[in-house]
Amino acid sequence: MIGNDYKAKYPGKKLITIFTQGNPDPKIGEQGVKFANNMLEELGWKLEDSIHYCGTSHNPDLAMFDELSLRAFKDGENLA
């Protein structure tokens, strides 16, 4: 399936990724996010946006939540 002659089944298919983590420091999960996004692009997908939210529900940043929710909604509209 994956080798030197790999061809994407749906080349150019658009996607967004959304990652969450409990740790408030985005650097903690940054490499994992980059790895996942790069892997999806290597498989022929076209990454339109990647959202990475950090923190817990003990001290939520509701303004940030609203901003990211709107961003995710608009991203979804743009996929169509």
Image (cartoon, grey):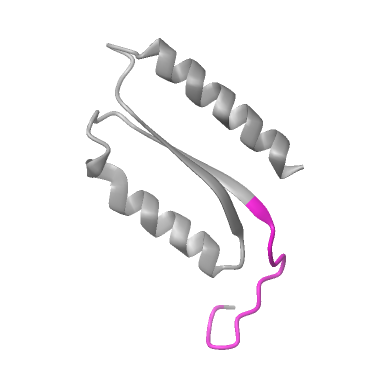
Q: Is residue 74 above or below residue 12?
A: above
What secondary structure prevails in the magenta region?
A: loop
Tell whether position 13 is magenta: yes
Across and down, in percent, residue 26 comes to 27, 37
Quadrant where the N terminus sits is: bottom right
Q: Is residue 63 above or below residue 74?
A: above
Name which quarter of the figure residue 49 lies in. top right
Whether residue 60 sits left or right of residue 44 in the image: it is left
Name which quarter of the figure residue 56 lies in. top left
Identify the residue at image location x=60%, y=81%. Answer: 6
Q: Is residue 78 above or below residue 14?
A: above
Identify the residue at image location x=53%, y=84%. Answer: 3
Tell whether position 6 is magenta: yes
Quadrant where the C terminus sits is: top right
Across and down, in percent, residue 8 comes to 66, 72
Across and down, in percent, residue 47 comes to 56, 53
Across and down, in percent, residue 50 comes to 48, 44
Identify the residue at image location x=22%, y=42%. Answer: 28
Towards the viewer: 48 or 17: 48
Q: Is residue 77 above or below residue 39?
A: above
Identify the residue at image location x=45%, y=18%. Answer: 65
Q: Please provide the residue range marked out in magenta.
A: 2-14
Name which quarter of the figure residue 7 lies in. bottom right
Q: Residue furthest right?
A: 80
Q: How many marks?
A: 0
Whether residue 2 sits left or right of residue 22 in the image: it is right
Whether residue 39 sits left or right of residue 45 in the image: it is left
